[in-house]
Amino acid sequence: MSKEKRLKIAIQKSGRLADISLQLLEKCGIFLAKSRDQLLCRAQNFPLDIFLVRDDDIPAFLATDVCQLGILGQNVLLEKQAQSNGIFSSLEQRLPIGHGKCRLSIAVPHDFKYNSIASLNGKVIATSYKGLLGQYLASKNISADIVTMEGAVEVAPRTHLADVICDLVSTGSTLSSNGLVEKDVVMQSQAVLVTNQISDPEIAAMADKIISRIKAVLRAENSRYIMLNSPTKSLEAIKAVLPGSQSPTVMPLQGCDDMVAVHAVCEEGVFWDTMEDLKLCGANSILVVPIEKMLD
């Protein structure tokens, strides 16, 4: 009897992205059962195994084909590719997840005289992203020494370990509390869905199905279904106000020859200002609802 083929995906074992990844799979209709060792979750209704590992290890799980899919920070993937001599070059970013947005930036102390990127020539820069920083400096023809740190990069200038730093920035509060000012953005980052080169057609078909479901969930999260009644004469003005929608569905209202019902999927935010603008155009009975699932 042949062994059941199962798709395998690696995600972070802890942290906010771990929770987001598990919730995303659950929204895709995947029912999970955790094992005792907390390393592996098996889906009960789909041939899928979920490996819970350190984010830095996810590219290795993909490159060695232990897993075929992975959800991790774009910065982690690109840093591994920058330092790997081609080991991770076959890994492909298939889908932006839209969560975990941050940026890799160069930050300097308040008293550091910074006029441009050229101010870094001959300086010492502390970072956890030696590969990405090295590529960035080379692209700008900057010669600087890089000190690699695994954590607490922001304290390097105060301890005289480095002149400036290159680190991940989300809100900037950590930089501010350590007397640092953000100057140059090396790269923008967010969580991404990554695949390796899947050779087995059955596994590839499973991966495509999961990716399609994730796309549908993400699209639904960022979309709203809007319903309203509109005077026929105001229809074009109302269409122009609807944010990010394709051609809406327009239906006659029984007993009202001069009114129509308008239904539309809006792929941008529908805010109070939008609803007030629609009302000014003549719309009434405006209803905005979230979308649970949406598949093209």
Image (spheres, rainbow, N blue to C red):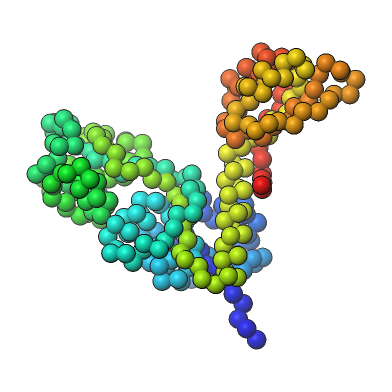
Q: Nearer the viewer, residue 102 or 247?
A: 247
Residue at 58% in and 52% down? 214
Q: Is residue 252 visible?
A: yes
**In the displayed structure image, the side of residue 133 where residue 65 appears, left or right:** right
Q: Position of residue 109 (x, y in %)?
A: 17, 35
Q: Is residue 178 visible?
A: no
Residue furthest right as drawn: 255
Q: Position of residue 128 (x, y in %)?
A: 26, 52
Residue at 77% in and 16% down? 231
**In the displayed structure image, the side of residue 58 where residue 266 appears, left or right:** right
Residue 221 vs 91, above or below: the answer is: above
Q: Nearer the viewer, residue 120 or 235?
A: 235
Tag count in the figure? 0
Q: Position of residue 73 (x, y in %)?
A: 40, 52
Residue at 75% in and 14% down? 233
Q: Nearer the viewer, residue 35 or 285?
A: 285
**In the displayed structure image, the side of residue 111 where residue 280 appears, left or right:** right
